[in-house]
């Protein structure tokens, strides 16, 4: 799923030495634009915020994140490309 992809990406960022902790305010602000933010699992929330904050994983639309949807191959490639460029 997209939230599982966010978890893997946040771990890769931590491995690269990128700051991967977020405050409650950062989490609230980063996800505010998504109407489906309540669907993000508690265990994945920080990872999703890190992905959004670092502009690695963006919403499927301006106001939808789709955390429970399967990540497409195209999305996965774009996310990995962005990660490698970080």
Image (spheres, rainbow, N blue to C red):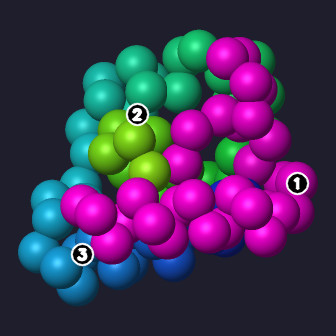
Q: Is residue 61 magenta?
A: yes
Distance in Å between CA atoms under marks 2 and 3 = 17 Å
How crowded pointer 2 is (Cα within 10 Å; few <14, some 14-19, many 20+) is rated as some
Q: At 31% from the left edge and 29% from the top edge, which residue is drawn? A: 26
Relative to 34, 82 lies left or right: left
Range of residues picked out in magenta: 57-86
Residue 16 visible within the image: yes
Q: Secondary structure at mark 3?
A: helix
Observer-nearest residue: 27 or 10?
Answer: 10
Q: Secondary structure at mark 1?
A: loop
Task: Quarter of the image for the C terminus: give it.
Answer: bottom left
> Residue 29: which quarter of the image?
top left
Residue under label 3: 14
Residue under label 1: 69
Q: Where residue 55 sits: x, y (%)?
A: 39, 41
> Residue 32: which quarter of the image?
top right
> Depth-wise, is mark 2 or mark 3 nearer the camera?
3
Task: Quarter of the image for the N terminus: give it.
Answer: bottom right
Residue under label 2: 27
Is 51 drawn above or below residue 29 in the view shown? below
Relative to 31, 75 lies left or right: right
- N-terminal of the pair, mark 1 or mark 3, is 3
> Depth-wise, is mark 1 or mark 2 nearer the camera?
1
Relative to 3, 55 lies left or right: left
Q: At 38% from the left edge and 50% from the top edge, which residue is drawn? A: 50
Distance in Å between CA atoms under marks 1 and 3 = 24 Å
Q: Is residue 85 magenta?
A: yes
- N-terminal of the pair, mark 2 or mark 3, is 3
């Amino acid at each position: 799923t997209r939230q599982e992809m966010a978890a893997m990406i946040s771990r890769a960022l931590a491995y690269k030495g990128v700051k991967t902790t977020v405050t409650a305010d950062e989490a609230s602000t980063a996800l505010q634009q998504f109407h489906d933010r309540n669907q993000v699992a508690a265990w994945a929330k920080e990872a999703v915020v890190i992905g959004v904050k670092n502009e690695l994983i963006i919403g499927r639309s301006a106001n939808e994140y789709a955390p429970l949807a399967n990540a497409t191959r195209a999305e996965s490639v774009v996310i990995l490309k962005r990660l490698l460029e970080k």
